[in-house]
């Protein structure tokens, strides 16, 4: 039905995109630089399905957090996602706490990796506090190139996702990411 079409394909039903998926998996397994990844495409092309497939692929040997950025409406929501990802008992209160949580989490990971996956990232473009929190988080991840990966999926059809009145700039963010285009 139409409703089923609107949701990401479950991993067992995912087809296609073999080259892209292989590149993403290789990038993570071989701990290629940078460990900040962006998957971009037009609306409805399959970014969410790719993210679900990646989470499924790494669920047994990594700690993953897949969430929809549309559900992150404030820094409190953002801090809660960090708590879930880092398995912390405490919710960070600021970005310094986030950095400390990541430091502790990496020590706890041992030989595993942590993969933080953000879908619908373009939804943060009109909330500069949330966008800046994710951008700062991405820079924190750069300290841990072998242990942590962060994957952002966003629409790149600018007419629907971004305009000049937005309070954010993607320049820094784009410069620290490896970008994969989903055609």
Image: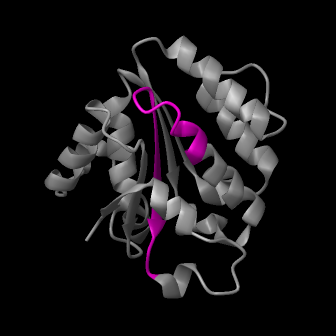
Kindly give the residue lying farthest to the right in the view shown: 93
Q: Residue drawn 66% across and 35% down?
A: 82
Q: Nearer the viewer, residue 5 or 73?
A: 73
Depicted 96 relative to depicted 18: above or below = above
Q: Position of residue 34 (x, y in %)?
A: 39, 45
Answer with left or right where residue 48 lies relative to residue 168. left
Quadrant hosting residue 161: bottom right
Q: Residue drawn 60% across and 39% down?
A: 140
Residue stretch in magenta = 138-157
Depicted 46 relative to depicted 146: above or below = below
Q: Nearer the viewer, residue 140 or 72?
A: 140
Answer with left or right where residue 56 lies relative to residue 19. right
Q: Nearer the viewer, residue 120 or 133?
A: 133
Q: Residue drawn 50% across and 16% down?
A: 109
Depicted 163 relative to depicted 72: above or below = below
Q: Residue drawn 27% across and 46% down?
A: 24
Answer with left or right where residue 106 lies relative to residue 77. left
Q: Position of residue 30 (x, y in %)?
A: 25, 32
> Is residue 143 within the magenta segment?
yes
Quadrant hosting residue 149: top left
Q: Nearer the viewer, residue 15 or 17?
A: 17
Residue 19 visible to the viewer: yes
Q: Position of residue 125 (x, y in %)?
A: 65, 70
Q: Position of residue 33 (x, y in %)?
A: 35, 42
Quadrant hosting residue 173: bottom right
Residue 120 visible to the viewer: no
> Is residue 28 within the magenta segment?
no
């Amino acid at each position: 039905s139409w409703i089923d079409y609107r949701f990401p394909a479950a991993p067992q039903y995912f087809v296609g995109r073999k080259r892209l998926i292989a590149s993403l998996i290789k990038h993570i397994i071989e701990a290629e630089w940078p460990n900040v990844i962006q998957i971009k495409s037009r609306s409805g092309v399959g970014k969410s399905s790719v993210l679900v497939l990646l989470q499924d692929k790494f669920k047994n040997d990594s700690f993953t957090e897949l969430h929809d950025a549309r559900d992150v409406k404030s820094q409190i929501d953002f801090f809660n996602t960090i708590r879930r990802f880092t398995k912390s008992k405490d919710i960070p209160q600021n970005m310094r706490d986030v950095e400390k949580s990541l430091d502790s989490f990496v020590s706890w990971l041992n030989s595993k990796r942590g993969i933080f996956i953000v879908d619908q990232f373009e939804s943060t473009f009109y909330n500069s506090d949330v966008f800046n929190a994710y951008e700062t988080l991405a820079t924190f991840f750069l300290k841990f190139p072998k242990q942590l990966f962060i994957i952002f999926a966003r629409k790149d059809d600018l007419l629907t996702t971004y305009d000049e009145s937005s309070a954010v700039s993607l320049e820094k963010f784009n410069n620290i990411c490896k970008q994969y285009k989903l055609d």
